Amino acid sequence: MKPTMHTHAQPEMSQLQRQLLGQDHVKFYTQQEFDAALAMAKAEIMTVAIQTTKQALFIEREACSELARADGHEELAEKILNRIPSQRQ
C-alpha cells in the first residue's frame, strides 16, 4: 500500500483580495510592524485619556470651589482649587 499525500487546495481568492494584491499602492505590514504601530496608538490613547481625566477632575474641583464660595467659605474654596496647584489654569 502506497502512502497517499494529502494536498490542500488553495481557497479561491475573493475579488477584493485579487484587487488588493494586484495594486502597487497597497502596503502590507509585518506582524512586528503592526504590533509596534498598535503599541504607539495605545500609548497615544492612554495619554489623551489621562489628560482628559485630569481636566475633568479640575473642572469638577472648580465647580465645588464655586459652591463653597457661594456659601461664604472663601478659605475652603481656595483650598479646593489649590489642592493640586500645578493643574490650576
Image (cartoon, grey):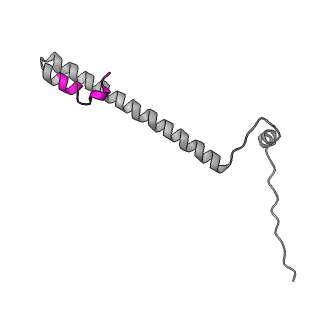
Q: Residue furthest front?
A: 86
In the image, residue 40 lies at what x, y percent? 54, 41
The N terminus: image quadrant: bottom right
- Left or right of 80, for residue 11: right
- Left or right of 25, for residue 29: left
Residue 85 within the magenta-colored segment of the rendering: yes
In the image, residue 33 lies at what x, y percent? 64, 46
Compared with 1, 28 (above or below) is above
Q: Write the start and end of the magenta stretch as one range.
A: 77-89
Compared with 77, 36 (above or below) is below
Residue 46 within the magenta-colored segment of the rendering: no
The C terminus: image quadrant: top left
In this view, the residue in front, 77 or 23, is 77
In this view, the residue in front, 9 or 50, is 50
Residue for point 51% across, 41% down: 42
Q: Residue furthest left?
A: 72
Residue for point 23% across, 26% down: 82
- Left or right of 68, for residue 10: right
